[in-house]
Image (cartoon, rainbow, N blue to C red):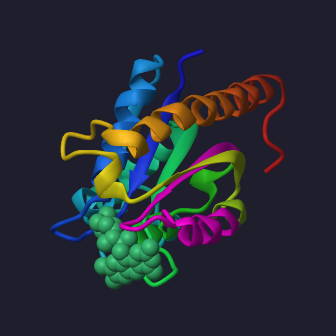
Amino acid sequence: MSSRILVLYGSYRRDRMGIRLANFLVAQLAERGHDVELIDAQAVGLPILDRMYKEYPKGEAPEALETLAGKIVAADAFVFVTGEYNWGMQPGLKNLTDHFLEEWFWRPAAIASYSAGRLSGVRSGLVWHGTLSEMGMVVISSSLSVGPIAATLDASAQPTGDAGAALEKSFGRFAADLEWWTDAAKAQKAKVQPPY
Ligand SMILES: Cc1cc2nc3c(=O)[nH]c(=O)nc-3n(C[C@H](O)[C@H](O)[C@H](O)COP(=O)(O)O)c2cc1C
């Protein structure tokens, strides 16, 4: 079943590498028949959190926030591309997610972490898991861990070498896991409205 999936990425660095993984995931999920959109926090350009979306009177939120809220509410699933800064999250992506709360509820989320080294940003993935749960998403069990990112995907987001082949191999299970939970959430919503 085709789903509407947002791939979220949040590095603001001019020489950023994680965009390769974000672009890879967008292309691969689209190839599986999904309607996929990259949400690039840098391009969205929200300020450091002042008011959450829901704290604005209806119709008065800034346009970027209003547009993004609509996309989040309309999505069936989310993929978070999580880089690691000093064993933690990238602030750009955290800032974007914190602008919303109820808009995220009742959908599955998947985590694809990466880093410059072989540990593949797994510590940021671990932190994101708890945060996404707190924000009302059900985090699927499969994750992707990509590192070293530069040895895995080239600048056009094409897999390279052994690391690229390993990513391609693990992507199938990751996507199938996300699809199963996405379809399950859609079917349940068609039967019963979420309780809150
Ligand atoms: C401020 C900063 C902190 C970093 N800390 C870590 C770290 O804790 N663990 C790690 O594996 N890589 C770390 N790195 C290296 C990143 O994995 C690498 O720069 C990666 O490409 C960052 O993602 P981006 O290019 O999409 O911004 C750090 C990089 C920066 C800029």
Frontmost residue, 175 versus 190: 175
Left/right of residue 167 with respect to residue 149 in the rendered view: right
Q: For the view shown, which residue lies furthest in the bottom direction?
A: 86
Left/right of residue 37 with respect to residue 171 in the rendered view: left
Residue 122 percent across, percent down from the top left: 57, 65
Q: Quadrant of residue 49?
A: bottom left
Residue 95 percent across, percent down from the top left: 43, 72
Whether the magenta-drawn stretch holds residue 117 is answered as yes
The quarter of the picture showing ligand 1: bottom left
Residue 79 percent across, percent down from the top left: 51, 46
Above or below, comparing residue 109 to residue 88 in the picture? above
Q: Residue at x 42, y 52 (%)?
A: 8
Frontmost residue, 196 versus 18: 18
Q: Residue at x 70, y 45 (%)?
A: 140
Whether the magenta-drawn stretch holds residue 39 is answered as no
Say whether residue 47 is visible.
yes
Q: Residue at x 25, y 65 (%)?
A: 45
Residue 121 percent across, percent down from the top left: 49, 67
Q: Residue at x 69, y 25 (%)?
A: 183
What span is colored magenta in the figure? 106-131
Location of the N terminus by quadrant is top right
Above or below, comparing residue 69 to residue 124 in the picture? above
Left/right of residue 88 with respect to residue 142 in the rendered view: left
Q: Quadrant of residue 136?
A: bottom right
Say whether residue 76 is visible.
no
Q: For the view shown, which residue lies furthest in the front direction?
A: 162
Q: Number of numbered discs present?
A: 0
Q: Quadrant of residue 134?
A: bottom right
